[in-house]
Image (spheres, grey):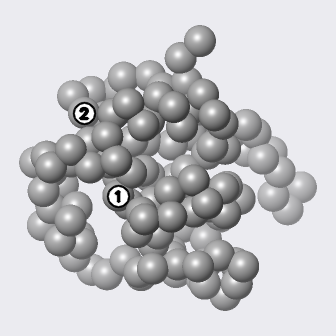
Amino acid sequence: MTALERFGEDIWIASGPTVTSVGFRYPTRMAVIRLSDGGLFVWSPVAASLELRAEIDTLGKVRFLVPPNSLHHVFLPEWRAAYPDAVLYAAPGLRQRRKDVSFDEDPGDEPARGWRSHPGVAG
């Protein structure tokens, strides 16, 4: 069974488990984007199952882990442990919410230099 689904050229998506927050249940979904240098940009990481990680590892090296906002934090510790060399970004409010997670960068108004190497990323 495949965890990743091809969404476009150098873009894959994966569905994760449903999570509960303030009494509401939410499905989880992430995107994996291969940058032009072969590195991977992981957007909104879901549960890092062994199957999912094995598939991702065949695509390239995970270089960036990016939660899109302060609600997308549940699975960050397991991604940090699995990919300690990846740059982990802190969406606004996440550093205060998840003091147990070691973040590397905060997103700015412009895409990070490493993200710009993909033709589909503005900057």
Give the percent coordinates (x, y) of residue 55. 47, 28
Instruction: Determine the residue positioned at 34% across, 47% down.
Output: 61
Q: Is residue 64 above or below residue 40?
A: below
Location of residue 7 by image quarter: top left
Location of residue 31 by image quarter: top left
Q: Nearer the viewer, residue 61 or 67?
A: 61
Q: Is residue 66 visible?
A: no
Give the percent coordinates (x, y) of residue 57. 42, 37
Q: Which mark is residue 27?
A: none
The N terminus - image quarter: top right
Instruction: Determine the residue positioned at 60% across, 28% down.
Output: 51
Q: Which residue reaches farthest bottom?
A: 96
Look at the numbered disc 1 and give the secondary structure of its residue: strand
- Reading the image, the residue beneath label 1 is 63
The C terminus - image quarter: bottom left
The mark closer to the camera, 2 or 1, is: 1
Give the percent coordinates (x, y) of residue 53. 54, 37
User: What is the three-letter code of the residue carrying label 1?
Assistant: Arg
User: What is the three-letter code of the residue carrying label 2?
Assistant: Asp
Q: Residue 10 carries which label?
A: 2
Location of residue 96 by image quarter: bottom right
Q: Is residue 39 above or below residue 16?
A: below
Give the percent coordinates (x, y) of residue 49. 66, 36
Q: Earlier along the polypeptide chain: callout 2 or callout 1?
A: 2
Q: Is residue 20 above or below residue 11?
A: below
